[in-house]
Image (cartoon, coloured by chain):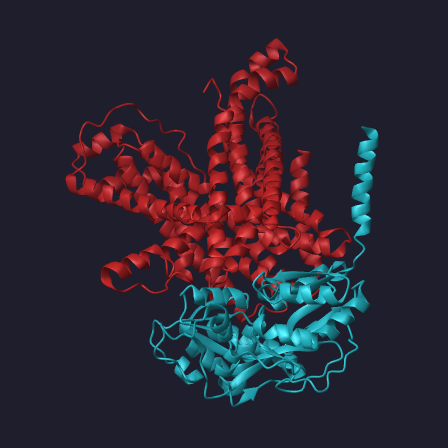
Chain colours: A red, B cyan
Amino acid sequence: MLLTLSLLSFAFGIFYTLYTFDDSTIFTQIDKRVWGLLRFTLYQAFLSMLLSLGVGGLLAWALAHQSAFRGRSILVALFSSSLVLPTLIVVFGIIGIFGRHGYLNQLSLFLFDDSFGSYLYGLGGILLAHVYLNASFASRALLHAFESIPKEKYKLAKSLNFTVFQRFIYVEYPAIKSTLLHIGATIFLLCFTSFAVVLLLGGSPSYNTLEVAIYEAVKLDFDIALALKLALIQLGISAILVVLSSRFKINVSNLKTSHTQIPWKEYRSIQWIQWAIIMIFALFFISPLAVIIIDGLGADFMRIMAEPLFIKSLFTSLSLALVSSLLTVGIALVLSNTLRELSLKTRLGNKPFASIVQGIVAFSGNLYLAIPSLVLGLGFFLIAQSYESPMWIWSTIAILTANILMSLPFALAILSPAMQHTAQRYDKVVFSLGLTPWQRWVYVEYPYIKSALGYILALAFCFSLGDLGIIALFGSDTFTTLPWYLYQLMGSYRTSDASGVALILLVIVLFVFVSVPLLFRSKHA
Amino acid sequence: MISKMFFALLLCASLLLGNDKPTLTIYTYDAFSASWGAGPKIKKAFELEHNCTVKFVGVSSSIGALRKIQLEGKRSKADILLGLDTSIAQVAKKTNLFVPHTLDTKGLDVPIAYHDDTFVPFDYSYFSFVYDANRLKNVPKSFEDLASMPKDFKIVIQDPRSSTAGLGLLLWVKSIYGDKAGDYWQRLSPYILTITKGWSEAYGLFLKGEADMVLSFTTSPAYHIIEEHKTNIKSALFKEGHYSQIEVAGILKSSKNQALAQKFLHFLHSKTFANIIPTANWVYPVIKANPLPKAFETLTQPSKTFLMDGKKVEAQRRTIVREWLDGVN
């Protein structure tokens, strides 16, 4: 409860700092440029969402109907890892494939003696990167929805002689609709606040999102008033979006998968299409990662390792990631505990105020979506400006806070149901045995939420390690993280060193994401 | 054991205290501070003359270095800011973070005389679009040519809000087109591949082959001739004339090494510096020293040059940048 209050008051504090820092210039006028920025931000977020849903939906549909081929589970696991892939790494790989001198152009130059030229910088590149990051994430969730469709419905569709299109309209679409809405809203928000992708691939001021414009106003123009104006607009819109999107809830719980096998196969032509979709997307997804590995292996690792700045940023990144992931787990535990306290009828659930408080607690966990990291960073920045303490303290606090807020929504979504479940199942036993809280934790809670905790830890660690957001405001020659170091290498076009560092970052992230959950694997599950 | 530890501690302490050489911290743009840039050579020469340590801190662009100082405010560790140009120096002066110098700037060898009580010139060159003659055959000879190239022709320029080169281009276009500058930017916009924060990022993109031309300097090809023995990198001569850039340096008010910092500014006008800078930063020195290397004779020599007065630039900088933003949008 206390935590919720502090999270909320923190949000208010940020808003208050932003609001009071500059007296009157904020509401003077929203000029042409700000309008342009806002329009483009919304436009690219909308297009990104549509494309991601389209591609993700097709992929999920194809995967759902091709349910038994070799490597399917690996492929699905790979797609779900896109969540933790650092944006910077993805963009780096995408440039390697689709850049003017990327493999695609080289291939086309080789085959047709003509290249596609440079098409990556601008809206095209932004959309490409957003689809890469979000379509795989969407397909994972949609696949789950497709797989929850009772097989009996498919049988019925077959007996009614539905075409593939009719089957989609009457059987599949109703089942995935709620997931589609929910995922769509999330993707829209993520793209609305997209920073790293637009910073790297935007190319010119005409392709700026509000987040990048805030960054530029501070770092390029030192125009704090403009940054504040943009931050407030951004804050307002994302708050509205979060409130609107919280109405879309996934309800797949009532659908149960039966073990009925479907004995017939799809039409040959449809099968071909499904295979083509899976192949094309797998290629699209894997090739940028492959490029990072191939290019990275050619780097001079001795030289990279000998660079003091590299060692420093690696150390900073790892310690920030460790601290923020541990804190995320702690906060997620406390918040989930409060949530279940409030929602279970056997506890406080039937008190009149419970549902309201529960809503507030849940919202505090989802703060990140409402307060984009650059706005958060700006708030911290202004606080740091008015106090005479070393910059690195503020930088550390700002980055830790942003990283925790970023991981919390995911952590809560994973942990909360698990804890709810243990309480429903074991509350009576625990109370009748009179276990102390410690005993309860050791014997009842921990064994059951262990694997969830491991997953959250890994997720938060990877998020923090790959984050290129606030550090863009706070990064300097004395305070740097691995993504920021990589960004600067890319900026100075020390390509070979950059690909080496990209590979190192990718390896660490994948290693943590795979190995940490294994350490926590529960024997019961 | 204890005595050993004591000695170890003593050793550490003496190492820490023994290092009483003052450190002069200079913020500059990355191409200057880089291992292949002018920074290391300047550092060596100045450290040799004065018993001190010089530390260059490179930021992605020169205006970026100024913003860094503004962000750090009184906490800034910088003693000197090096690498702004005469067009943006007024902005730096207005921050009140800098102190006047003690130099006489008369008689400097610069395109247009520049006298300011705070910032001193240390090198100059002329903005120009640089290309690879092996790849680009149809070289534009004017801004009009540039805006009527084939569709797949791409240039890379710098952001005028972070890079002095980017700002220089805006002033160059403004000097030629006046009220029609906004219109020109609209016409040029389709050819701009990307807009980078600083010069080195843009130049890197060009060298990687991502763009056909890059905004750089008439003196840039000298690097390729002298260091790489390549004569195919050239700078295009534009009929309308070229815009000059005089780079300047200034001392921070918050600096604790005022005397040493003043010495460094004096060093900028020494023969030693003038002999290093042409083949380290690839520009012209501001005082006459040894004759320039032969490669410099082959460089493009603009017959007509522009340079707007710093105060005049500051008066309309925001309008010009806005005009550009609207044009490229």
Q: Is residue A445 found left or right of B230 in the rendered image?
A: right
Q: Is residue A390 found left or right of A182 in the rendered image?
A: right
**Residue B247: x percent and y percent?**
63, 76
Q: Is residue A407 found left or right of A203 in the rendered image?
A: right
- Which residue is located at x 46 percent, y 61 percent? A202
Q: Kindly indicate the quadrant of the structure image that contains residue B322.
A: bottom right
Would residue A194 be seen by someone viewing this image from the given angle?
no
Q: Is residue B12 above or below residue A112?
A: above
Q: Nearer the viewer, residue A357 or A369?
A: A369
Q: Nearer the viewer, residue A300 or B86?
A: A300
**Residue B222: x percent and y percent?**
50, 75
**Residue A71: x percent and y percent?**
31, 33
Q: Is residue B165 above or below residue A281?
A: below
Farthest residue to the bottom: give it: B303
**Residue A114: x percent and y percent?**
27, 65
- Which residue is located at x 32 percent, y 35 percent? A146
Would residue A481 be seen by someone viewing this image from the given angle?
yes
* Placement of the N terminus of chain B among the 4 image quadrants: top right
Total count of labels = 0
- Which residue is located at x 62 percent, y 30 percent? A334
Q: Kindly indicate the quadrant of the structure image that contains residue B171.
A: bottom right
Q: Kindly indicate the quadrant of the structure image that contains residue B84.
A: bottom right
- Which residue is located at x 35 percent, y 34 percent? A74
